[in-house]
Image (cartoon, grey):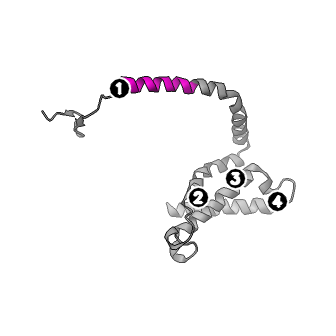
C-alpha cells in the first residue's frame, strides 16, 4: 500500500511539474498557481511530501514532536482531497462540481427545512427509545437479553 502511495505521489508530482513548466508558476496570466484548482493540486502534493517526511524520522529529515520538531500528522488529512484532483483533469466533471457549488446558496432554505425535519424525528426517536437498553446485558453470540435472575 505504501508503494502504491509513493507511485501515485510521483505521478502527481510529474503532472504538477509539467503543468508548471507549460503554464508558468505565478507570473503569467493563466499561471498554475493563479487557478484555484492548480493551487489545490499544489497544496495536496506538497502536503503529501510533508507527511512522507514525517513518516521517516530516523533519517533526520523532520524530528518527531517529542524531539522538538513539528507534528505534521494533521497534513495527512489532505490525502482525502486527492480524488479532487480528477476534477481538474475532466472538464465536464469540473463544470458539474462548479455548478453544484454555485447552486448551494439557493438551496439553503431547503437544507434548513430538512435539518428541522431530521431534528424532529431525532427527538422523537430519543424519547420513544429512551431507557430501552438501560441496565441490560446482551449475549453477543445469540443476541438474547441476558437475565441474572
Residue 111 is left or right of residue 140, and the answer is right
**Is 100 above or below relative to 15?**
above
Residue 100 x, y percent position in the rendering: 69, 34
Q: Residue at x 69, y 39 (%)?
A: 97
Q: Which residue is mark 1?
A: 129
Q: Earlier in the sequence, mark 4 or mark 3?
A: 4
Q: Quadrant of residue 59?
A: bottom right
Q: Say few, some or many: other residues with alpha carbon within 10 Å of mark 4 (under 14 / 14 to 19 / 20 or more).
A: few
Residue 125 x, y percent position in the rendering: 41, 25
Q: Earlier in the sequence, mark 1 or mark 4?
A: 4
Residue 109 x, y percent position in the rendering: 65, 25
Q: Which residue is mark 4?
A: 26
- How much space separates mark 4 and mark 3, taking CA atoms? 14 Å
Q: Say few, some or many: other residues with alpha carbon within 10 Å of mark 1 (under 14 / 14 to 19 / 20 or more).
A: few
Q: Earlier in the sequence, mark 2 or mark 1?
A: 2
- How much space separates mark 2 and mark 4, taking CA atoms? 24 Å
Q: Are marks 2 and 3 in contact (CB under 8 Å)?
A: no
Q: Which residue is mark 2?
A: 75
Q: Which residue appears farthest toward the left when viewing the image?
A: 149
- How much space separates mark 2 and mark 1, taking CA atoms? 40 Å
The kind of secondary structure element at disc 4 is: loop
Q: Quadrant of residue 11?
A: bottom right
- How much space separates mark 1 and mark 3, taking CA atoms? 45 Å
Q: Say few, some or many: other residues with alpha carbon within 10 Å of mark 2 (under 14 / 14 to 19 / 20 or more).
A: some
Q: Are marks 1 and 4 in contact (CB under 8 Å)?
A: no
Q: Which residues are magenta?
A: 114-128
Which mark is nearer the camera, 1 or 3? 1
Q: Earlier in the sequence, mark 2 or mark 4?
A: 4
Q: Which residue is mark 3?
A: 40
Amino acid at each position: 500500500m505504501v508503494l502504491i502511495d509513493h507511485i501515485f505521489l510521483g505521478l502527481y508530482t510529474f503532472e504538477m511539474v509539467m503543468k508548471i513548466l507549460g503554464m508558468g508558476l505565478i507570473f503569467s496570466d493563466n499561471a498554475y498557481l493563479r487557478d484555484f484548482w492548480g493551487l489545490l493540486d499544489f497544496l495536496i502534493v506538497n502536503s503529501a511530501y510533508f507527511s512522507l517526511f514525517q513518516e521517516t524520522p530516523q533519517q533526520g529529515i523532520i524530528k518527531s514532536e517529542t524531539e522538538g520538531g513539528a507534528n505534521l500528522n494533521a497534513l495527512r488529512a489532505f490525502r482525502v482531497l486527492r480524488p479532487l484532483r480528477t476534477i481538474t483533469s475532466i472538464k465536464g466533471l469540473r463544470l458539474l462540481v462548479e455548478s453544484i457549488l454555485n447552486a448551494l446558496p439557493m438551496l439553503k432554505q431547503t437544507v434548513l427545512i430538512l435539518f428541522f425535519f431530521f431534528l424532529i424525528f431525532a427527538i422523537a426517536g430519543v424519547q420513544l427509545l429512551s431507557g430501552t437498553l438501560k441496565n441490560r446485558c446482551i449475549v453477543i453470540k445469540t443476541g438474547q437479553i441476558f437475565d441474572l435472575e
